[in-house]
Image (cartoon, rainbow, N blue to C red):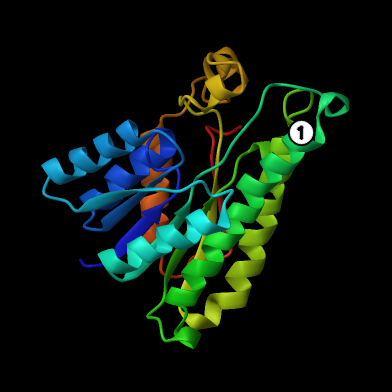
Amino acid sequence: MDQVAIITGGSRGIGRATALAAAARGYKVVVGYASNKAAADEVVAKIESSNGKAIAVKCDVGSEADILDLFKQADAFGPLGVLVNNAGVVDMTARVDEMSAERLHRMMNVNIVGSILCAREAVKRLSTKHGGKGGVIINLSSVAATLGSPAQYVDYAASKGAIDTFTLGLAREVAGEGIRVAAIRPGLIDTDIHASGGEPDRAHRLAHNVPMKRVGQAEEIANAVVWLMSDEASYVTGTILDVSGGR
């Protein structure tokens, strides 16, 4: 397979697991990362050690210039087949009446605007309307979109609610142009994103609220992503798939 899969936030957590899973299925992987070059290089090295092909590209999806550069480098690597909009941020646990405008702008810029801009660039390359051969866009949402995350991070939950709506709208917009668009809503997953919200043990602390009584693993999300990417999901678009242990 010569197709390229761009995975934003691909250096750790769900993004890393997805990058490895996509490479195992024959995709050439572009690992987007915001700041941790060492982690991104490790993912590339792991893929290459299994005879896969990958490159790491620094990309803060809060920056349109970075996004344009990401896609430019991906173009040089091969024809785009898949975009996984995985990059996102959380912030410290807070009530809405404690949130600053700066925090809100950062949250929405990275989690919503960044994902839409990446999708824009992907559509330009994938759509048959633009001479493309079709492809897949997978957005990473969160069960927070349906739970609201009160007294934790309502702003993050709201940003993921926007991703759900964007997924539905874009899917219907480009369904006749060879592009499938879907989203995954992970539940409590054992990744270090919780540490950036000030609660590194959050997933395990809340595991008792999950019907399956355990946290999920990044690989379990990646397995769902690569299924949606595959021809096995050829009639699936506009779908939001909960991978949350029943939460």
Residue 167 drawn at (x, y percent): 61, 60
Tell me the quadrant of the picture where the N terminus can be found.
Answer: bottom left
Depicted 199 relative to depicted 22: above or below: above
Residue 239 % position (x, y):
57, 59
Residue, x 41% and y 63% (percent of image)?
71
Q: Which x, y percent locates residue 64?
A: 56, 58
Q: Is residue 245 left or right of residue 125?
A: right
When asked about the image quadrant of residue 3, the answer is bottom left
From the viewer's side, name the closer residue of 52 and 212: 52
Looking at the image, which residue sits at the far right?
97
Q: Nearer the viewer, residue 171 or 198?
A: 198
Q: Is residue 219 visible?
A: yes
Q: Residue under circle 1?
A: 154
Residue under the point 67% across and 48% down: 109
**Camera-side residue: 152 or 233?**
152
Q: Does residue 127 sit above or below 118 in this rendering?
A: below
Say what secondary structure mark 1 lies in: helix
Residue placed at 55% from the left, 28% from the top? 188
Label 1 is placed on what type of residue? Val
Q: Please tell me which residue is depicted at 47% across the width and 68% down the height of the picture.
A: 122
Q: Which quarter of the figure has residue 203?
A: top right
Residue 232 can be seen in this image: no
Residue at the farthest front position: 65
Total residue callouts: 1
Q: Quadrant of the C terminus?
A: top right
Mark 1 crowdedness (10 Å alpha carbons): few <14, some 14-19, many ≥20: many
- Residue 29 x, y percent position in the rendering: 29, 54
Where 121 falls versus 52 (above or below)?
A: below
